[in-house]
Amino acid sequence: MLSAGGDQVGRPGTGRGGHQRRQTSRTQPSVREPGPLPATFISVSFESLGLKKPILKGVRDAGYEQPTEIQQHAIPKVLAGEELIGLGQTGSGKTAAFGLPMLDRLCGGEPGLRGLIIVPTRELCVQVAENLRIYAQHAGLHVCTAFGGIDLSIQESAFKRGLDVLVACPGRLIDHLERRNISLEKVEMVVLDEADRMLDMGFMPQIRRVFLRMPDERQNLLFSATLPKEVEALVEDFLPGAERVQIGRRSESAKTITHRFAAVSVSDKQDALERLLRREDGKVLVFCNKKVGCEKLGNMLKRAGLPADSIHGDKSAEARHACLGAFSRGRTRFLIATDVAGRGIDVDDVELVVNYDFPLALEDYVHRSGRTGRAGKTGRAISFVAPSEKKLYEVVKAHLSGKEVSSAPSAPGRGYGMPKGRAGKTGRKPRRGGGRRAAAGAV
Ligand code: AMP
């Protein structure tokens, strides 16, 4: 299935014409169960990981004193040229875990687009690029973004001023490739961030097209906080034999988050939310499953005099950017969001995440709640559970209590899965850049 389709379209490491894998270790995956760090880990410094001076200066500018656990494991392996699957909880520092060694390897080389990071949303694109620019500022490397919703020419002009690392959403990346604004012929390293999402049905055809444009010899990296069992085989197929760094259990929530669940009927949810928000004095991120519901709820709260706003896929890139900015600065304390803000978004000091609508898959729960309790801070998640939402609540509860469960999305249009055979053979045309969630009209 995948092997046939994957090989035809340029699966990483087995690309067209010749198989030239990077140095890849086939040792056992280094899976660490959560628990107190051994002293050897606690004393690890960024200097001891082998990063070059200009990158270490960037690390200091970012204010990081010690590498997080995933950084300690991943950075030396990436620096050594290994292909890697990096799995760690939300907020555990994955961006630097791939970003620092990528910049280090590219530092001092020929100018040109040699590092590519592919992400699922505009917000994540901007955020990852902002982090990388801090890390790269003494290394003479230019970091650009490519995401939809703004004029192509703005991004094109930025590429002309210098482009060494591109952080891109797949659809806009293809637009630039088709217009020959960029070439991927010199790409040496590629990262799929939020890898389970990037490999799901909606994005996979685009990912394959992008991979076809890159040289066969390159270093491939996959990073994610969640990896549903259903995607596991796909990942293995995509990066066969890659080293794995996994911190904690599969799709584990950060230990710093406390989880609560409240039985609330659909008709009582609005009142319950308003009462809850009036008691909160910090930043709260509230998740809805659908764009329309998200917009309505945001408007209702604003009319009720609360400092609220909403963010979802029907808003323009500028509006979404402004919205997140106001939330980051604390001018809007209550942000009502669809899953566009579910993955990767790192807003300081989100004290509470509310699932107004219960998420439709376990991984969505992990990502949403992971917007709080980041970088070692504590956080709270409260989920409203209507009678119709009990099934997924049971799955989430079992997962949080340590049981191995399947993500079990049951709604139509949901669920991970590869197109059977080549892209397009499913008979269902995935929406561009959309995938299962956009197909269901959610984001
Ligand atoms: P990430 O999981 O990459 O989104 O990172 C989560 C948060 O942790 C971000 O605010 C990062 O800036 C921060 N962070 C990443 N690495 C470190 C580190 N080694 N020390 C302190 N904070 C970090």
Image: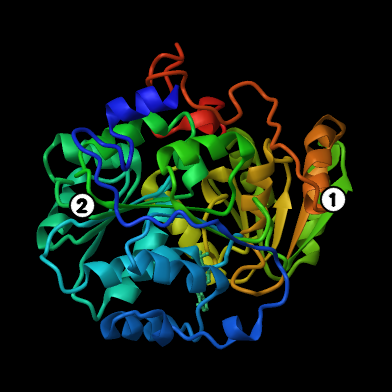
Residue 261: assigned label:
1
Task: Work out whether 221 lies above or below 295.
Answer: below
Residue sitting at the far front: 27
Question: Nearest the camera: 158 or 174?
Answer: 174
Residue 32: assigned label:
none
Left or right of 368 in this view: 398: right
Residue depth check, mark 2 versus mark 1: number of the one nearer the observer: 2
Q: Please, what secondary structure does the residue beneath circle 1 have?
A: strand
The crowding category of the residue bearing disc 2, from other C-alpha atoms within 10 Å (few below 14, some 14 to 19, many at least 20), is many
Task: Work out whether 118 lies above or below 53.
Answer: above
Find disc 2 in the rendering and name its residue.
187
Residue drawn at (56%, 26%) of the image: 440
Q: Amino acid at mark 2?
A: Val
Left or right of 296 in this view: 403: right
Q: Amino acid at mark 1?
A: Phe
Residue drawn at (26%, 42%) of the image: 173
Ligand 1 within 8 Å of the CB at mark 2: no
